[in-house]
Amino acid sequence: MRKDVVIWIFALFFCAAFSTATHEIRSQQPVTLRVGWTGEPDSMNPFVAVSTEYYEIMLLTHNILIEFGRKLEPIPGLAEKWESSPDGLVWTYHLVKNAKWHDGQPFTSKDVKFTLEYVIDNQMEMFSDYVSHVISVDTPDEYTVVLTTDTPTATMEAIWIPILPEHIWKNIDPKSIQTYEETHPIGTGPFKFVEWKKGEYLKLAANDDYFGGRPAIDEVIFVHYANSDVMIQALKLGEIDVVSTVPPTMFEDLSKTPNIKTLSSPQIGFDELGINAWDTSLTKNNPDLPDLADIESQGNPLLLDKRIRIAMSHAIDRQKIVDIVLLGHGTPGSSLVSPGTPFWHLDLPQEQQYEFNLEKARKILEDAGYMDRNGDGIRESKDGKKLEFRFYLRSEDANSVKAGQMIEGWFKEIGIKLDSEVMDDSTLGDRVMDNGNFDLFIWGWGGDPDPSFILSVVTCPQILSWSDCNYCNSRYDELFRQQSTILDRNERQKMIFDMQRMFYEDSPYIILYYNLSLQAYRTDKFEGWVEDQPVGVVMAYNRGTYMNLHLKGTGEEKKTGVGMGSVLAGFTLLWLIGWLRRNTSW
Amino acid sequence: MVDRMAKKKYLLVKCGQTLFTIFIVLTLNFFLFRVMPGDPARTLIHNPRISPEIIANLEKVFGLDKPLYMQYLYYLKNMITGNMGMSFAFRRPVADIIADKMGNTILLVGVATVLSIAIGIFIGVIAAYKRGSRIDIGALAFSLFMWAMPAFWLGIIMVIVFSIYFRAFPTSGITIPGYSHDSFFDLAKDVAHHMFLPTITLALVLLGEYFLIMRNTLIDVLTEDFIMTARAKGLSDARILQKHALKNALLPMVTIIAISLGFIVAGAIEVETVFSWPGLGRLIYESLRNRDYPILEGVFAIVSICVIIANFASDLLYAYIDPRVKT
């Protein structure tokens, strides 16, 4: 009898040890996704940070009211349902009830009110545009927020402001926000911030209490590489699981490597040849533009002639630039809204585009009266002004310099001379955006999932502000105002198409190419990568991959799998002992 | 007595010169960044439509609202008190950011420099002593080859050979990302493992300079008359080398070593970039790209002060080791 007791105690102990042992293995080796990137967040302070890397972290640690799906469509975030009043002025957001801050405090409508008012009252950089029409934020109960606007606003489903905890941020003085250092951001998102070693890595851990369900992986570590060649080697070695940007030169080789999948996806944004099209007759003495009343353009006035701009457009072989400069990883450019946001992108038919045709370009210039009268290879206007322009390129982007050289060659063939100068971005910004002292340049834009921002850049009031071509067209501006008040997506799309067509025909920008985002990931450790979205598996405006990813072969039952296994093993052991006890003289 | 007076005077003059040089360098450092094109406020403010009050507040925080000479006086005062202002890009005190990176850089570049000096001198002495032999020619070719080698290229080759082919060392970083170390020993082991490749790369590249200078000065010294005299006295080769030749040949090395040690804090941009080593070299490069003037001013000030002080130290050392330096 005593022997029996000893055996049973032994069995139970063994069982317990086995289950804690398996548990320990699990907690010692968390399932970690390692993301390699060559950039780094510029800050953890949402009111200062502008880098895409920061936005990726924010997406994982915080929530916004309405988030973006795989096709950039609005999907529930902290608001599970929302509706607008018939006149489109009052928007009601019904919030999720089970959300908690990472420090355990409950999330309520007060936090939303606080965040939005913090932005509105203090005109916070970047964010204030999203709520510029909001005149009041009301909270009828703990889980409802009502926003009232002064005009119907099309972007009320795309308020890209991370909701912040009132109990923490109420203590932070908005006046010193520019120098406030956020060391440990608290959000409601599926991952909690753990630590950031600048220049090394940034670590996040799964949030067990996430209202949308805990992610299957336990940790995400973003590893910073200062050199992209080494980063690719690290992916091949398995030091990291996914790379957010693959250099085009290594893409081909990587796609042939076993256990690695490469993908190229459309990106939001483009690189353009900008032309100074500032017609001061439209901005001087314009009662709507008091700031520009007595400012003269410092650009070459010849560029106000649309025919020169169109001839330039005909003289650029965009496909060749894509093939040579981007090694084929891009799409030739046309309209202002990039195909990264397919719903809003105007896909101009070939016959409506200014195709590459040097003969046609020469003819347009000749018909407009620009001839080479003195035989120096450069055309002159009727009053003898040379078609010679300043051309600014970016020292920080080798692609812009290469494309610039190609363009210089084509323009020479049609009798336009370019004087290239390579400069850094601060100098370029100073000349182009702050002083309008330029003729041509190559630069680019990234963008929002909503087209409002990129469309706004080329409106008249943006001259000497965001605008870098100083385009001013009252019809375009009128359409811009109208579309921002249209709540019906299809109707708004039509207007946005009209705007893009108008802008393309006027050609103050010659959009050279839309970039493709090149990414690569390992296929041997995880499965559940979400591919069918802009940008790729990561940095994709939504957290699909991070939520969906799980260790290969474990599927969803991973978490219970370990527990069930040990219970099963315990029972087998007990049965075995019982069997031995019965069948031996033990 | 006269000798001691002269030494004291020499010391005072050198001190004065050093302080004056530091002052000139700091002044240049200040104006260098003010004459560069582009408005520093531009890098501070991402939204051109921001309200004038916020701009004014920002300029006040960063001291850009004052006239230039006031900014200069404030700058001098801050440099003396060690307050180097606020970084534009990181919005953190410059001193903190530099302190974060300084240790990493001193560790990597310091070890590599000391290693390359030791090996460089050792091989240099052997090569000079056996000049014209196969060892000399081999060492000469090797160190010229290494000296001419671009550091980033050598670094990538090291990664390919040791990380990818042999899988012996990690490709980059300073520790395993996200790993929490149990003990100091554990941490030291991890850092050493990560440090190996960048240190060897840097040491190989730096080696050539010390080797060549050591070899050539020693050869010069070995052909002088007093060596002949020593040999005529019947001294052994080893004794001639130790007591007569090396002592004289080491003099130029002292200056070079002192300056190299001063430059350690400047980091090694190429090696730090290839191996993603979070040091000052990379900080300088990134700050230059971001136009982060306060950081650049801070780093340049520290680097130049270190080099000047190292130079000062070598001057002092000279007074003791070189009997010719008296006044």
Image (spheres, coloured by chain):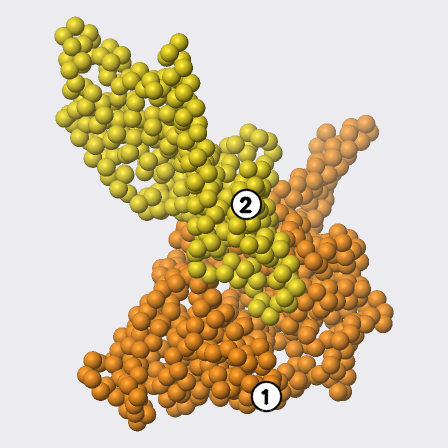
Single out the residue that lies furthest toward the bottom: A367
Place residue A493 in its image quadrant.
bottom right
Position of the N terminus of chain A, as image quadrant, is top right
Which-is-in-front pick, marks 1 and 2? 2
Q: Quadrant of residue A75?
A: bottom right
Left or right of A507 in this view: B53: right
Residue displayed at 30% across by 23% down: B251
Most distant residue in the right direction:
A141
Nearest the eye: A223 or B283:
B283
| Identity of the residue drawn at 62% across and 76% down | A73
Q: Give the image location of residue A214, x and y in percent.
A: 69, 57
Q: State the hue of chain A.
A: orange
> Is A432 rendered above or below residue B153?
below
Q: Quadrant of the C terminus of chain A?
A: top right
The 10 Å Cα crowd at callout 1, few under 14, some 14 to 19, many 20 or more, is: few
Give the colour in which the image draws chain B.
yellow
SS for tag 1? helix
Q: Is residue A335 left or right of residue A140?
A: left
Q: Amino acid at mark 2?
A: Leu
| Residue A291 place in picture, x, y as percent | 58, 77
Q: Are discs 1 and 2 both within one chain?
A: no
Q: Residue at x 55, y 66 (%)?
A: A540
At x 27%, y 14%, the residue is B242
Which residue does the numbered mark 2 point to in the structure image? B73
| Image location of residue B321, percent across then percent down | 34, 17
